Amino acid sequence: MLRSLFDSLVPPACLICRMPPPPGGALCAVCRARMPWIEDPCPRCALPRGVPGGCPPCPAGSATFLAAWAPVLHTGPARDLLLALKLRGATEAADAMAAQMHARAPQGWLGPGTVIVPVPGLPSRRRRRGFDPAEQIAAALGRRAGVPVVACLRRDETAVRQLGGGRGARRRSVPIVLARAPPATAERVVLVDDVHTTGRTLETGAAAVASGNLSQIAAATYVRTPTAA
């Protein structure tokens, strides 16, 4: 009842363009139609195959994680939706992202025996925002998939700042460590982050999880940059 009253006073708006969305939807039809969906992705690095900057050669050929996926490229309305979460604090955007990530998940990765582990951001950014984007997306994906979300990783304040960094900065070692072991019942781990660029952060997180004797690891993000460089 309170929700209906709120909606009557403040009508729902598309999280990207602020136009009216369909009933119960987070995005309007125009923004959904413009989503840069990734078709024919590489199952290992999530890059679209057969396009400039795509795969092969696969940049994740020797990665610790065995699979990776992202529903959309980091451009256009997908990038705008991510910025709505990260810059405007529109945490409801995480639900829309998780729905797309769940719909594009490879078979077998989001089922019984899976544990979702968010890749932590810098503590200073969390304090500034009041939340961590990866944790919001991971929580929404866990609810949708019906699997547990466990914060197993810790990231030090001295970690390399990813936002706006050049290629050299992004490729430096990012200190992500295993804060506690995943549950003993876990058969596989799905690392969740917002953006997959070089894969360095995901690889560091996967290596930390693997140190806890779990080898079935996948990396799921909302967006994938069009090139691994």
Image (tube, helix red, strand yellow):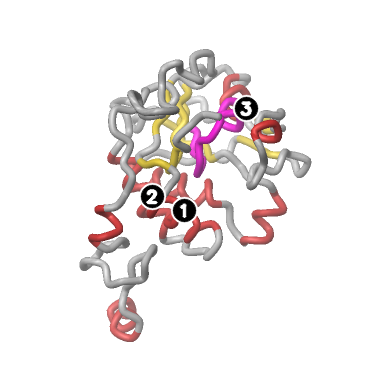
| Kind of residue indicated by mark 1 | Leu
Q: Which of marks 3 and 1 is in front?
A: 1
Q: In this view, does 40 lie to the left or right of 63?
A: left
Q: Callout 1 environment at 10 Å: few (<14), some (14 to 19), or many (20+)?
A: many
SS label for mark 3: helix
User: Image quarter for residue 213?
Assistant: top right
Disc number at residue 82?
1
- Tell me where the magenta segment starts and ends, as one range: 191-203
Residue 175 highlighted magenta (yes or no): no
Q: From what the image shows, is residue 4 above or below residue 15?
A: below
Q: Nearer the viewer, mark 1 or mark 2?
A: 1
Disc number at residue 97?
2
Residue beneath the point at 47% across and 61% down: 84
| Kind of residue indicated by mark 2 | Met
Q: Tell me the quadrant of the picture where the N terminus can be found.
A: bottom left
Tell me if label 1 and label 2 are in contact, CB under 8 Å.
yes
Disc number at residue 204?
3
Label 2 vs 3, first from the N-terminus:
2
